[in-house]
Image: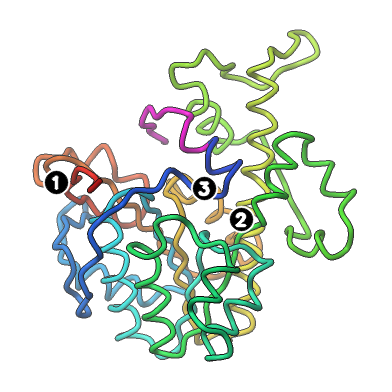
Amino acid sequence: MFRHVRLTAGPIVVALLTGCAGARASTAPTTASGDGGASPRVVSAASGRTVSFAQMADDAAKADVVFFGEQHDDAETHRAELALLSAIGDRRSTVVLSLEMFERDVQQLLDAYLTGGLSETDFRAQARPWPNYETDYRPLLELAKARHWPVVASNVPRRLASMVSRKGLSAVDTLAAVDRAYVAQQSLCPKDQYYTNFVEVMGGGHGAATAAPTSASPASPMAGMTELFYQAQCIKDETMAESIVRAREKAGPQSIVVHFNGAFHTDFGLGTAARVTRRLPNVKTVVVSAVPTPDPMAANAKELLDRGQYIIIVKRLAPTR
């Protein structure tokens, strides 16, 4: 059922330890005009055919939660994100923006900035925005601010994810109450398809184990490291999912939550997406996955269809230095 793209472990390891993948300098995203943007190729998994951006937006706007899986360092992906968020906002009256890129312990700062109680300079100095915030995430936040949408700092603080990557999931139980509140109340870390995908990515070219260590086969140092990184990945997914669920419950059943994260977190409906569905089994979700490629029209879309309901194939541009 699941297909995999061989990736290197680097981006995931960096994200777990520092909170984001390597940033790039890029040209600023163009201003989205509803259905506009960078004119990527959009493929519907239901039909296997290319559809218009507007058709995708129409369908996504009918959901309760939309997950957009991005490639953090791709400029065209970020233009498509802004275009889709704007288009959904044109179609729905109650929108909540949720971001992997901000962590729970800066929610008050985020709220203060959105309501005018904190200057942008002070917000950016205190809220630990990602290095590519100016070009890639500020447009999303400013759109939400202009339209008076709430924004959710959904992720677990990176220092706590880093702690789990060193000490394991049980370390969460040792946290003081103030820090424990920044981690999902329930964190499950099953050895499921998501785990298999994670191990495959972590093992890309580095000789990591492809299965969980057992008492019969002692774990190698690399396998043990993979286990700890997976547990850190789980608390990120669980915390983002809990944040999304809380945000929708607060906004009401008429709301739509649009959540942006790295594609691995939601591709194939796994990770964060599966954890939202576990908590809210009756909500309608739409997973969008961005795939940068040198030639979008030549890409074999059939190999990508199980990543989500919609695949946005964008032209991969060389990062601007």
Identify residue for label 2: 275
Query: Does residue 121 sit above or below 254 in this rendering?
Result: above
Kindly identify the amino acid type of the residue bearing the numbered disc 1: Pro
Mark 3 vs 1, N-terminal side: 3
Kindly identify the amino acid type of the residue bearing the numbered disc 2: Arg
Residue at the image point whose x is 30% and y is 78% from the top = 86
Q: Secondary structure at mark 3?
A: loop
> Which quarter shows the N terminus?
top left
* Number of marks present in the image shown: 3
Magenta segment boundaries in residue numbering: 1-12
Identify residue for label 3: 270
Image-based side of 39 in relation to 138, left or right: left
Residue at the image point whose x is 60% and y is 52% from the top = 237
Residue at the image point whose x is 50% and y is 87% from the top = 254
Residue at the image point whose x is 39% and y is 29% from the top = 7
Identify residue for label 1: 296
Residue projecting furthest to the top: 217
**Cα–Cα span, label 3 and label 2:** 8 Å
Query: Does residue 242 sit above or below 231 in this rendering?
Result: below
